[in-house]
Image (cartoon, helix red, strand yellow):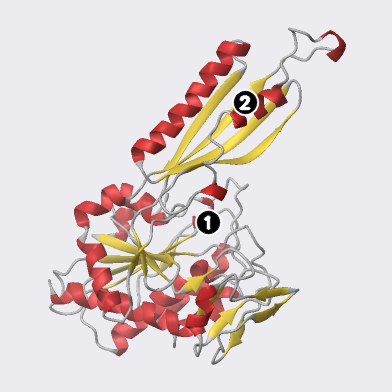
C-alpha cells in the first residue's frame, strides 16, 4: 500500500486536540486513530504494538540478522490535528495528473498559484487537497502514513536494519506531544520526527519559547474626581504594549528573527491582563527579550506603585540545535539520503516548536524531516502522493545507511 492511500484512511478520523483541556489526551477521539494504528501495526508484524492510557502508541521492529549492533532508530509522528481549523468530516479530494494551475476547493476557497507559487512545481503529480471546509490533516497523519509504509517496505524490499522504534503521540499541536513518551521503553539511540513540510526540508533549529502574562491592578475612582488618584489598568496594559519594539512582531520578522507576539489583551479600570508569546532562535537574544519584560514590570511599578504590575514568565521549549550538534551525523545522514532522491536539501529553521525539541532536551536527539505537505492547519492544506513516496524512500534509506555502517 502506498503512503497516500493510508493517509486517505487516516484523515477521515477526527482527532483534533483541545488546548483548553487539562486531560491527557486532551480529546478522547484521538484513541480512535490510536487503536486503528495498533491493529495495523500488529498486522505488519509489530508484535509489541500497544497504546497506553495517555494515548501514546508504541511498537518496535526487531533488528534483522547481522544488524543487532546497528543504532536503534526512532520514528515519531503525532495523532492530533490543530484546533486552528475544523478536523471533523474531512473529505479529501484527489486531483490526478494535476495541471499546476489554480484549484477550486469549494466553500468559496481557491488554492492559487499566486499565494502558493510552488504549485507549479507539483504539475503532473497526484495532488491531494481539502474540499475547502476543513483542514486536511496531513499534519501529521502523513507522517504516520509514511512511517507505517516504511515498515512495510523494509519487509517488501528485504532491507537490513537495526531495531526500529515507532511512536505516535497525542496533543503535539497544543505543545504536549513528547512530554509523557516513555523514552526508556522507546529504547532508541536517536530519532526523527516526520512532521515537517516539503520533502526536501530538514529542521534541527527551532525557537526558544516562553509565555509571558502581565496582570495589572488598577485603582478605580469616579472619573470626575480621578486626578492623581485613578490608575486605569486597561491603559497600563496599552502602555506595556507601547514599550515593546513595534518592529519585533510576527508580522515584521522572518527566518531566525525573534518577536514579541501579543496574543490576548482584556480588562477594565480595575483589572487588566495582557499576554504574549516570546520567540527567538538565538538564546542570548531570547534571554534579552525576557529581561526587557522584567524591566517593564519594574519601571511601571516604580511609576504607579508596587504591586500594580505583576509578570509571570513560563518557558515552553528551547532551541534543539544545542542538543543536535553533538550528534550531527543524524542530520548529515538524512541530508545524504534525501540528496540520493534527487532533492536539493534545505536546512529550515522552524519558526515554532516541535516534539523533536522536547525529545532532544530529554535525551533523545531528534531532528524533524519533511512529510511532503504544505499550508498546514487550514483549508488550503495539500500534499502529493509522489512527495509522500519520496519521504518513504528517504527514511528507508536512512535505516539502510545505518545498518550498512554498523
Label at residue 63: none
Where does the image place residue 66, in percent across and percent down from the top left? 12, 78
User: Dot 2 surroundings within 10 Å: few (below 14), some, or many (20 or more)?
Assistant: many
Viewer-proximal residue, 288 or 39?
A: 288
Q: Is residue 295 visible?
A: yes
Q: Is 227 drawn above or below residue 321 in the view shown? A: above
* Percent x, y of residue 114: 60, 73
Element carrying mark 1: helix
Quarter of the image with the N terminus in it: bottom left
Q: What is the quadrant of residue 236 in the picture?
A: top right
Compared across the picture, whether 350 is left or right of 239 comes to left
The part of the image, by quadrant, that contains residue 347 is bottom left
10 Å crowding of disc 1: few (<14), some (14-19), many (20+): many
Q: Residue at x 50, y 28 (%)?
A: 293
Q: Is residue 274 above or below residue 334?
A: above
Residue extending furthest toward the right: 224
Quick one: 312 or 27, which is closer to the camera?
312
Q: Is residue 132 above or below residue 331?
A: below
| Residue at 59 percent of width and 86 percent of height | 94
Q: Is residue 358 above or below residue 231?
A: below
What residue would you read off at disc 2? 215
Q: Residue furthest bottom?
A: 97
Q: How far apart are labels 1 and 2 at the CA level?
A: 27 Å
In this view, the mark in front (1 or 2): 2
Q: Residue at the spot x=47%, y=53% of the render?
A: 254
Q: Residue at x 54, y 21 (%)?
A: 297
Kindly identify which numbered label has been placed on residue 173. 1
Q: Is residue 103 left or right of residue 333?
A: right
Query: Of the residues under marks 1 and 2, which one precedes in the sequence?
Result: 1
Residue 27 % position (x, y): 60, 57
Amino acid at each position: 500500500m502506498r503512503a497516500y492511500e493510508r493517509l486517505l484512511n487516516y484523515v477521515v478520523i477526527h482527532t483534533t486536540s483541545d488546548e483548553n483541556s487539562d486531560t491527557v489526551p486532551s480529546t478522547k477521539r484521538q484513541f480512535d486513530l490510536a487503536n486503528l494504528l495498533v491493529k495495523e501495526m500488529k498486522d505488519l508484524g509489530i508484535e509489541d504494538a500497544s497504546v497506553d492510557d495517555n494515548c501514546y502508541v508504541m511498537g518496535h521492529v526487531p533488528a534483522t540478522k547481522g544488524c543487532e549492533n546497528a543504532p536503534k532508530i526512532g520514528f515519531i509522528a503525532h495523532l492530533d490535528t490543530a484546533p486552528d481549523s475544523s478536523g471533523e468530516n474531512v473529505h479529501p479530494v484527489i486531483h490526478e495528473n494535476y495541471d499546476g494551475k489554480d484549484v477550486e476547493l469549494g466553500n468559496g476557497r481557491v488554492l492559487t498559484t499566486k499565494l502558493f507559487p510552488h504549485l507549479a512545481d507539483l504539475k503532473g503529480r497526484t495532488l491531494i487537497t481539502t474540499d475547502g471546509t476543513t483542514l486536511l490533516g496531513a499534519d501529521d497523519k502523513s507522517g504516520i502514513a509514511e512511517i507505517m509504509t516504511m515498515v512495510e517496505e523494509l519487509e517488501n524490499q528485504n532491507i537490513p536494519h537495526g531495531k526500529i522504534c515507532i511512536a505516535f503521540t497525542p496533543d503535539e499541536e497544543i505543545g504536549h506531544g513528547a512530554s509523557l513518551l516513555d523514552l526508556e521503553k522507546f529504547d532508541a539511540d536517536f530519532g526523527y520526527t516526520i512532521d515537517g513540510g516539503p520533502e526536501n526540508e530538514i529542521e534541527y533549529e527551532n525557537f526558544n519559547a516562553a509565555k509571558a502574562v502581565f496582570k495589572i491592578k488598577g485603582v478605580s475612582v469616579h472619573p470626575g474626581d480621578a486626578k492623581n488618584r485613578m490608575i486605569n489598568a486597561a491603559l497600563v496594559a496599552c502602555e506595556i504594549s507601547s514599550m515593546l519594539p513595534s518592529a519585533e512582531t510576527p508580522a515584521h520578522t522572518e527566518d531566525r528573527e525573534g518577536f514579541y507576539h501579543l496574543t490576548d489583551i482584556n480588562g477594565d479600570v480595575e483589572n487588566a491582563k495582557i499576554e504574549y508569546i516570546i520567540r527567538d532562535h538565538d538564546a542570548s537574544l531570547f534571554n534579552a527579550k525576557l529581561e526587557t519584560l522584567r524591566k517593564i514590570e519594574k519601571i511601571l511599578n516604580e511609576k504607579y506603585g508596587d504591586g500594580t504590575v505583576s509578570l509571570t514568565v513560563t518557558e515552553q521549549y528551547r532551541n534543539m540545535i544545542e542538543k543536535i550538534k553533538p550528534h550531527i551525523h543524524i542530520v548529515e545522514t538524512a541530508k545524504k539520503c534525501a540528496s540520493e532522491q534527487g532533492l536539493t536539501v534545505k536546512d529550515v529553521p522552524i519558526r515554532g516548536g516541535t516534539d523533536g525539541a522536547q525529545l532532544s532536551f530529554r535525551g533523545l536527539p531528534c531532528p524533524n524531516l519533511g512529510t511532503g505537505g504544505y499550508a498546514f492547519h487550514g483549508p488550503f492544506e495539500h500534499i502529493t502522493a509522489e512527495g509522500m513516496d519520496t519521504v518513504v524512500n528517504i527514511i528507508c534509506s536512512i535505516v539502510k545507511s545505518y545498518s550498512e555502517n554498523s
